[in-house]
């Protein structure tokens, strides 16, 4: 109990005297805050990219592609194969028939707004059932494209990031002139980075004949997936891969997300080393300015343990303040920031928003506390080993 009382007394004494060392303490706080801002901002890119792709998926929707294909762009399905897939057991049906859309994906050239740099933007040819498969798609401006006409609707994120696709504009892609007739939203998913048109018009414009690249099928329920998959994989007429939509888009996000996270941690480590040295310098200054005070406490019978704990607590308190400030500034400056980047697996542009999530903020605070701990360890040990007789001579 005596040791605990000593610990509390010395720690509170340290914290109450922080105001006397405001200038040196601010150096450590600012350095740690800077590391947390960069760390959280970089990881929010990966989180935003992942979120955009994952929110596009639904457990009761299946994606069917050619066997061996990693993406739609490398897949190919004949018209008859798409009909077999749509007729498979487990597919949801309504008055219009199977809720399954055979689709193809082509790339169109657009320039990024404010930059003028060219980008590959996906244009998706869809069948009418596509709007039943993805019921989150809502038209927010203009009108729907008409079947059999060279018209497109544009995702909200694509309209914000790329030039020349305002409603009413006409552009030439493939062998046709396309008119933008509407803008749609899809709950912030990857679909908002695309342009949609009638598949029957996209095919001849890009000389695709009657071929498609994937079938998106709405299932009767998430539990119907295995029945649907087993029926198709057992059909000798087909050589296909069947995945849940959530699984497909999760795979699409892995490569870039992993790279960004690796860079984020590497940058955090390099900057963190500098911040730790700043914290060490700050705490050495604090110990030096309190040499007589520490010696007096030791002479009065206070042990080395409470002294070490008090110095570490001060360092981690400063780190916590820096981490909190860094987290708040990262959230205010980056959360929701809209941008676009290349999906390396499909080589198409995806528009997304940075996402500063609570888990990222917790990681930022944890990083700050780790830096505070290592920044205070050596000064704390020095304070505990300070010879009492030598220090008392400075009184």
Image: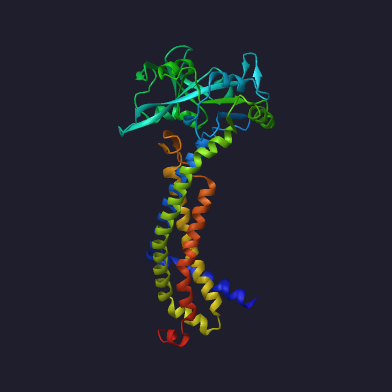
Q: Position of residue 251 (x, y in %)?
A: 53, 39
Q: What is the quadrant of the N terminus in the image?
A: bottom right
Q: Is residue 109 above or below residue 314?
A: above
Asked if residue 134 shows in the view, the reply is no
Q: What is the quadrant of the C terminus in the image?
A: bottom left
**Image check: 134 left or right of 90?**
left
Q: Quadrant of residue 22?
A: bottom left
Q: At 52% from the left edge and 57% from the top edge, which residue is drawn? A: 366
Asked if residue 115 shows in the view, the reply is yes
Q: How many marks?
A: 0
**Image check: 8 left or right of 31?**
right
Q: At 36% from the left edge and 32% from the top edge, which residue is drawn? A: 119
Q: Position of residue 386 (x, y in %)?
A: 46, 81
Q: At 41% from the left edge and 20% from the top edge, which residue is drawn? A: 206
Q: Is residue 300 above or below residue 260?
A: below
- Quick one: 334 or 178, which is closer to the camera? 178
Residue that protrudes farthest toward the left in the picture: 116
- Quick one: 243 or 210, which is closer to the camera? 210
- Quick one: 16 or 362, which is closer to the camera? 362
**Image check: 260 left or right of 87?**
left
Q: Position of residue 156 (x, y in %)?
A: 45, 27
Q: At 42% from the left edge and 60% from the top edge, which residue is drawn? A: 272
Q: Is residue 143 above or below residue 385?
A: above
Q: Position of residue 57 (x, y in %)?
A: 57, 33
């Amino acid at each position: 109990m005596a040791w605990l009382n000593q610990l509390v007394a010395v720690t509170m004494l340290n914290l109450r005297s922080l105001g006397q060392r405001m200038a040196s303490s601010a150096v450590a706080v600012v350095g740690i805050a800077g590391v947390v801002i960069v760390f959280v901002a970089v990881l929010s890119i990966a989180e935003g990219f992942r979120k955009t792709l994952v929110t596009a998926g639904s457990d009761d929707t299946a994606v069917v592609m050619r066997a061996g294909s990693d993406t739609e762009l490398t897949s190919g399905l004949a018209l008859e194969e798409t009909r077999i897939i749509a007729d498979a057991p487990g597919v949801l049906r309504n008055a219009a028939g199977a809720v399954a859309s055979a689709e193809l994906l082509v790339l169109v050239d657009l320039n990024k707004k404010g930059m003028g740099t060219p980008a590959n933007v996906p244009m998706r040819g869809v069948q009418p059932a596509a709007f039943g498969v993805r019921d989150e798609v809502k038209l927010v401006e203009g009108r729907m494209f008409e079947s059999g006409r060279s018209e497109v609707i544009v995702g909200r994120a694509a309209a914000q990031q790329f030039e020349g696709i305002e409603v009413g504009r006409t552009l030439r892609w493939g062998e046709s002139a396309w008119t933008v007739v509407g803008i749609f939203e899809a709950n912030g998913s990857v679909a908002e980075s695309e342009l949609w048109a009638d598949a029957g018009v996209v095919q001849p414009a890009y000389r695709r004949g009657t071929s498609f690249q994937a079938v998106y099928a709405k299932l009767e329920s998430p539990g119907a997936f295995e029945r649907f998959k087993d029926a198709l994989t057992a059909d000798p007429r087909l050589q296909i891969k069947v995945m849940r939509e959530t699984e497909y888009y999760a795979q699409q996000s892995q490569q870039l997300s992993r790279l960004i996270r690796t860079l984020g941690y590497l940058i955090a480590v390099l900057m963190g080393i500098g911040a730790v040295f700043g914290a060490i310098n700050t705490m050495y200054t604090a110990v030096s300015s309190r040499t007589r005070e520490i010696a007096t406490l030791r002479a009065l019978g206070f042990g080395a343990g409470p002294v070490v704990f008090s110095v570490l607590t001060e360092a981690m308190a400063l780190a916590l303040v820096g981490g909190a400030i860094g987290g708040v500034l990262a959230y205010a400056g980056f959360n929701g920031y809209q941008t676009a980047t290349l999906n390396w697996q499909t080589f198409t542009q995806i528009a997304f928003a940075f996402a500063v999530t609570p888990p990222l903020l917790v990681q930022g605070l944890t990083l700050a506390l780790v830096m505070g701990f290592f920044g205070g360890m050596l000064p704390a040990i020095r304070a505990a080993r300070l010879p009492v007789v030598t220090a008392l001579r400075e009184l």
